[in-house]
Amino acid sequence: MVNITVRKGSITLLNVDAVVNPANSYGFMGGGVAWVIKNVGGQIIEDEAIAQARFHIGQAVLTSGGELIARQVIHSPTMEEPAEKTNVVNIQQAVQAALELADQSEFTKIAFPGMGTGVGGVSKKEAAQTMVKTIKAFPAHFLREVILVGKEDEMVKAFEEALKN
């Protein structure tokens, strides 16, 4: 069983095997959490993601972590096109794909931001509930810990509420 914890802060500061980037299918990291990851970790992360494009919702790809503390980044699309609206089905598929890639890579500890809650337009509450449900149902072999990270109080609270249910 995977242990789920919630933290407030920047996903770029976590010492984990990988952080998850709520990507688009082209690997462009122009906004939101993706931009923050690229800004801190370096252009190499986006370059490596673009080199593997086009990857679709329900698929995930792995890149180096560049200058991040995390060794690697899992890019898992919540949307096909950059900055398009998404939904909870896409979020569920993106979280599932990220978990599967993490487990196949024998990672024991990864971190997720709110998936689809920025330009994707899904409410933090709905996203958090979908994410927690998907993580709890995942039959992990290697993965032991998932950290859910919120930069603002609303996301942290949504994750905490979802974990209680």
Image (cartoon, grey):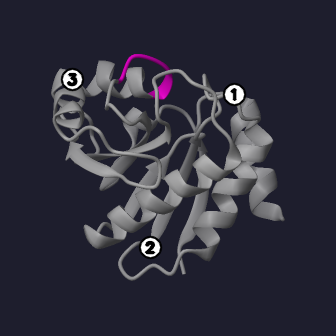
Quadrant of the drawing holding the C terminus = bottom right
The majority secondary structure of the magenta stretch comes to: loop
Mark 1 to mark 2 CA distance (whole Å) = 30 Å
Q: Name the residue beneath numbered marker 3.
A: 42
Instruction: Tell me which numbered mark, 2 or 3, is placed earlier along the sequence.
Output: 3
Front in this rendered view, residue 85 or 136: 85
Q: Which-is-in-front pick, marks 3 and 1?
A: 1
Q: Amino acid at mark 1?
A: Gly
Q: Quadrant of residue 69?
A: top left
**Which region of the structure is painted magenta?**
29-33
Q: Quadrant of residue 53?
A: top left
Q: Residue at x 57, y 24 (%)?
A: 84
Q: Amino acid at mark 3?
A: Gly
Q: Residue at x 46, y 23 (%)?
A: 82
Instruction: Tell me which numbered mark, 1 or 2, is placed earlier along the sequence.
Output: 1
- x, y (%) of residue 100? 40, 67
- x, y (%) of residue 19? 38, 46
Picture layout, residue 93 above or below residue 1: above
Q: Is residue 95 magenta?
A: no
Query: Disc 2, disc 3: CB below 8 Å?
Result: no
Marks counted in the figure total: 3
Mark 3 to mark 1 CA distance (whole Å) = 26 Å
Q: Name the residue beneath numbered marker 1.
A: 121
Callout 2: few (<14), some (14-19), or many (20+) C-alpha neighbours within 10 Å?
Answer: some
Q: Name the residue beneath numbered marker 2.
A: 144
Q: Residue at x 77, y 45 (%)?
A: 126
- In the shown orientation, is residue 52 left or right of residue 86? left
Instruction: Tell me which numbered mark, 3 or 1, is placed earlier along the sequence.
Output: 3
Q: Amino acid at mark 2?
A: Arg
Q: Quadrant of residue 133?
A: bottom right
